[in-house]
Amino acid sequence: MVLDESPSERISRYSQLLSGQLQRLRQELYPPEAHKNLRAFSSVDVARLIGVSESTIRQLDLDGEGPTPTRLPNGRRSYTLEQINDIRRVLAERRRPEEVINVFPQRREGEKLQVIACANFKGGSAKTTTSTHLAHYLALRGYRVLAIDLDPQASLSAMFGIQPEFDVEPNCTLFGALRYDEERRNLSEVIRPTYIDGLDLVPANLELAEFEHIVPTAIATGASTGENIFFRRIKNVLAEVEDAYDIVVLDCPPQLGFLTLGALFASTGLLITLHPQMLDLASCNQFLGMSSDLMAVIENNGGEMNLDWMRFLITRHNPNDSPQTRVVGLLRALFGEDVMTAPALESTAVANAGLEKKSLYELEPGAIGRETLKRALESMDSVNGEIEQLLWSSWGRGE
């Protein structure tokens, strides 16, 4: 401890020490440029991602159609995600119109932008883990995805290899597009591409918290009225980039502030993450009660909310834990089909991947135990596949 150091100076010193260490750790994890890269995929992976046979992928290469894969020393083919998306386009040209969406699922004319808010009061309910894996899954499936970090703590941004205090300049978060003064920017100006083809990000840092402070002033001065009222801000700025994306994933902060309210109003789908413990259940009850009251205020002020679906997602579930199983049974009895069929199972694979700021989809085969990774991926795919089906239903596909 430094003598004659005030509490604020002490906390500031600790912040600087920790920031420097985090920066060094990141450079060790991703040398030499300190940037993340997505792993390559085998022809088996490609076939699974697109939903065709492996022989189809091999034949495209033999016929000289589509991208040329990298040949590994063992003779096997290796593809980047960009190449996989090129293959999707080639296959789509060969399909009948009604079959195209099976290999190239991007939204068609007349299908609205899907906006999924991942929300809950409770820290530790796996909102960021869920948002990260959902965004990665959808990008790997071939959709054009925009992930937006709404939490000033910037955990989602960190999962993309971004350290907020070093890598995010002032006015480069969603706050830059939401603010009410002359420094407001078009949303496209704060979007940055990621290392995953088809997946873009609006990062966060502490400046996002400023939105909670400026809204009361905007209300008092009359700036937050009509189409500019605070709860319409996120929906309105998303309209600026609507044509560029199929799906937006919003990782909400663990509180019901103005940012979360704006996210709820902008959403077409609401995903409430819930760890099956009694304390989390009580917190979720508070979240639902307050959300209901605040949504009613929005509706009474002319804000029509149009959710296509709302689901509770059981996260970090241990099916061998009897108390957890009872909580899950209670939720299914109370909320029926609004509880997702597939839970996100608790797994050391998710925890180990998180230590490297990676999703399961980024892990190289063999990075952890094969069976452990397989079980974790099957669970995550089941969750995300169920959400994808909700998106297709919202688009009217398969009816």
Image (tube, helix red, strand yellow):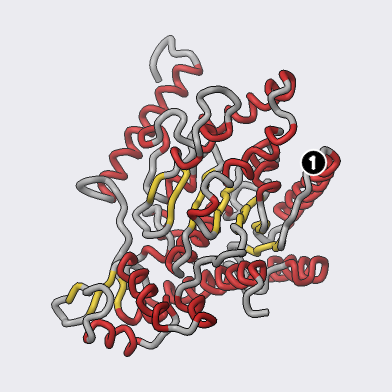
Left/right placement of residue 333 relative to residue 367 reads right
Residue located beneath label 1 in the image: 298
Give x and y (percent) for residue 170: 43, 28
> What residue lies at 38% left-to-right and 49% top-to-bottom?
193
> What residue lies at 70% left-to-right and 53% top-to-bottom?
280
| 105 relative to 5, above or below | below
- Check the picture and name the quadrant holding the N terminus: top left
* Residue type at numbered disc 1: Ile
Give x and y (percent) for residue 33: 23, 45
Give x and y (percent) for residue 219: 73, 24
Give x and y (percent) for residue 145: 48, 57
Q: Nearer the viewer, residue 105 or 153?
A: 105
State which quadrant residue 259 falls in.
top right
Q: Nearer the viewer, residue 125 or 95?
A: 95
- Check the picture and name the quadrant holding the C terminus: bottom right
> What residue lies at 42% left-to-right and 76% top-to-bottom?
49
For mark 1, give the secondary structure: helix
| 99 relative to 124, above or below | below
> What residue lies at 50% left-to-right and 36% top-to-bottom?
186
| 354 relative to 104, above or below | above
* Residue furthest top as drawn: 4
State which quadrant residue 55 falls in.
bottom left
Left/right placement of residue 247 relative to residue 286 reads left
State which quadrant residue 358 falls in.
bottom left
